[in-house]
Image (cartoon, rainbow, N blue to C red):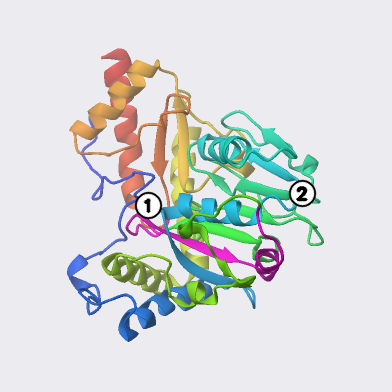
Amino acid sequence: MQPQVKPQNPNFSSGPCSKRPGYDVSKLALETLGRSHRSSLGKTVLAEVCEETAKVLGLPEGYRVGVVPGSDTGAVEMAMWSLLGARGVDVLAWESFGSGWVTDITKQLKLQDVIIREAEYGELPNLDEVNFDNDVVFTYNGTTSGVKVPNGDWIPADRNGLTICDATSAVFAMEMPWEKLDVVTYSWQKVLGGEGAHGMLILSPRAVERLETYTPPWPMPKLFRMTKGGKLVDGIFRGETINTPSMLCVADYLDALNWVKSLGGVEASIAKSQSNLAVIERYVEQNDWIEFLAQDPALRSNTSVCLTLKATPDQVKAIVKLLDKEGIAYDIGAYRDAPAGLRLWAGATVEAADLEALMPWIGWAYQEVTQG
């Protein structure tokens, strides 16, 4: 039978993600609108973004935080174009975005000393084989596969190369081994439910040392330049952005950071996301027609939860369309390069009660499409 209770919030998209509970755009601090980002006010607010991010995430001493253009993609590209080439590279790919970094490293930067470590959707490469004498590029959480690295134990503290980590759907949702990560990137529209177009770039002292001692052999686009005269352009990490940011998006991001603090900090946002995953896990355990793409629970994402169904790709599309039509769940189809299935966002901006309401509706839609 058709369930009676609908999710209060049907937004389960994996990016842009649902706004936080109780979000009200009219409550944002908007005194920066119409002002230059280079004004005293603009610089102060952008510096607050960097400082508050470091505080909320609990970054180690000496780590720098900057706002950069081009969302998470722009931040990763800045890091790769600026830092790679000094030594060999291990690049890990087990889903679409990791595969994109492989393409950039091998076909755009055209690096020769590259080891590509790949796995199928739902799995991880053998992390024990990664060579940390090389620089290592990887996603912490595969947004399109629902597979995350289990922890940072596989990364040695005494590594020679840099670790460059695309963590856009992991930061604020998973415990990050900061001391083992030299570059971390993310975007506001993922776990925090912020707005798009801006990326965050976090650099360790080791990454800064590389920037100041190594000059890549290729021309550097203006948007990627982080050094001048062999020294870090430190203003980037004090709110002096490379290009003009949206101050409305900045206000929205600060609102999201304040919300995380109101929950009890990043530990609370992680716990909320894990509790959301548990709702989905309970339902999957009770039904044999739905499974996690990530079979190993230790590798299972608690943000971008990817599910497969005992259904044809066309039937899966019909299920997604039916749930959209009923106003139950929007934008939950699997990523276009991933196996046919569902992808549910379970980050902290999603309420467990909405997931509790959603899961029976998925069962109803499955029955309607496959047996109706």
Residue tagged by mark 2?
134
Tell me if I can see residue 59 in this picture.
Answer: no
Q: Residue at x 53, y 38 (%)?
A: 100
Disc nearer the start of the sequence (2/1)? 2
Q: Say whether residue 287 is magenta.
A: no
Q: Residue at x 46, y 32 (%)?
A: 307
User: How far apart are labels 2 and 1 at the CA level?
Assistant: 41 Å
Element at label 1:
helix
Residue tagged by mark 1?
352
Q: Say whether residue 197 is magenta.
A: yes
Asked whether, in this view, residue 357 is left or right of residue 184, the answer is left
Element at label 2:
loop
Which is more foreground, mark 2 or mark 1?
2
Q: Amino acid at mark 2?
A: Asn
**Whole-percent x and y of residue 351?**
35, 54
In the foreground, 72 or 233: 233
**Mark 1: few, some, or many residues within 10 Å (few <14, many ≥20)?**
many
> Which contiguous range is marked in magenta?
188-216
Tell me if I can see residue 21 in this picture.
Answer: yes
**Whole-percent x and y of residue 256?**
36, 67
